[in-house]
Image (cartoon, helix red, strand yellow):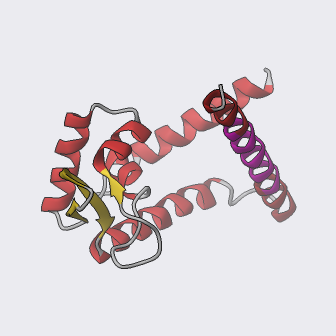
């Protein structure tokens, strides 16, 4: 098999593992939204709901329903955008931050358990190579994005 096929297979298997043993608190889609938000009162700028919808590739109305659910559960705070009264700025509440941390720990445990039989040097090498691949892909995406916006 080619490398790209093996990567796709690994990513698919990881997604299935996460979904099969989904946490009780956050759905996969909840988690993907929450990790994009800064902590309320912390470092980082609040995010506009329309920008979040665009980043996730969702229709704004779909994102609005998801955000409403997260706000109802006390995981996010929505404040009116002073620059546009129709829009909201979103941040994580402390409860949202805690939920994200628990979900991250759950996901780490799933991978750690899966790699328990691997030699330490193999785990370290996998981590190094995945980091290198991610850095390369992110750099390539940024370069291509910069090229499109410069046209």
Depth check, front residue: 122 or 127: 127
Which picture quadrant has residue 115?
bottom right
Q: Is residue 143 left or right of residue 30?
A: right
- Dominant secondary structure (helix, strand or loop) of the stretch shown in magenta: helix
Q: Is residue 36 left or right of residue 130?
A: left
| Residue 139 counted in the magenta span | yes
Q: Is residue 67 above or below residue 78?
A: above
Q: Residue at x 43, y 70 (%)?
A: 101
**Residue 60 percent across, percent down from the top left:** 25, 36
Depth check, front residue: 3 or 120: 3
Which picture quadrant has residue 7?
top right
Depth check, front residue: 130 or 77: 77
Q: Is residue 22 visible?
A: no
Quarter holding the N terminus is top right
Q: Which residues, given as a range, are shown in magenta?
A: 128-142
Q: Is residue 111 visible?
A: yes
**Residue 29 percent across, percent down from the top left:** 34, 45
Q: Is residue 30 left or right of residue 7?
A: left
Q: Is residue 63 above or below residue 117?
A: above
**Residue 84 percent across, percent down from the top left:** 23, 52
Q: Residue at x 37, y 44 (%)?
A: 51
Name, please, the residue furthest toward the top. Answer: 1
Q: Is residue 73 above or below residue 29?
A: below
Q: Residue at x 38, y 72 (%)?
A: 39
**Residue 135 percent across, percent down from the top left:** 75, 49
Depth check, front residue: 2 or 41: 41
| Residue 124 counted in the magenta span | no
Q: How many marks?
A: 0
């Amino acid at each position: 098999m080619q490398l790209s096929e093996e990567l796709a297979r690994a990513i698919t298997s990881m997604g299935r593992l996460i979904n099969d043993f989904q946490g009780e608190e956050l759905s996969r889609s909840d988690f993907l939204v929450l990790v994009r938000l800064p902590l309320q009162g912390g470092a980082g700028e609040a995010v506009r709901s329309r920008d979040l919808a665009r980043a996730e590739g969702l229709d704004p109305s779909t994102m609005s329903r998801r955000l409403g659910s997260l706000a109802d559960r006390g995981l996010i705070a929505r404040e009116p955008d002073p620059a546009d009264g129709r829009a909201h700025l979103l941040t994580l509440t402390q409860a949202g931050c805690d939920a994200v941390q628990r979900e991250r720990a759950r996901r780490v445990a799933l991978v750690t358990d899966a790699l328990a039989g691997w030699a330490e040097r193999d785990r370290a090498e996998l981590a190094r190579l995945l980091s290198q691949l991610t850095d390369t892909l992110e750099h390539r995406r940024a370069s291509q994005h910069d090229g499109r916006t410069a046209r």
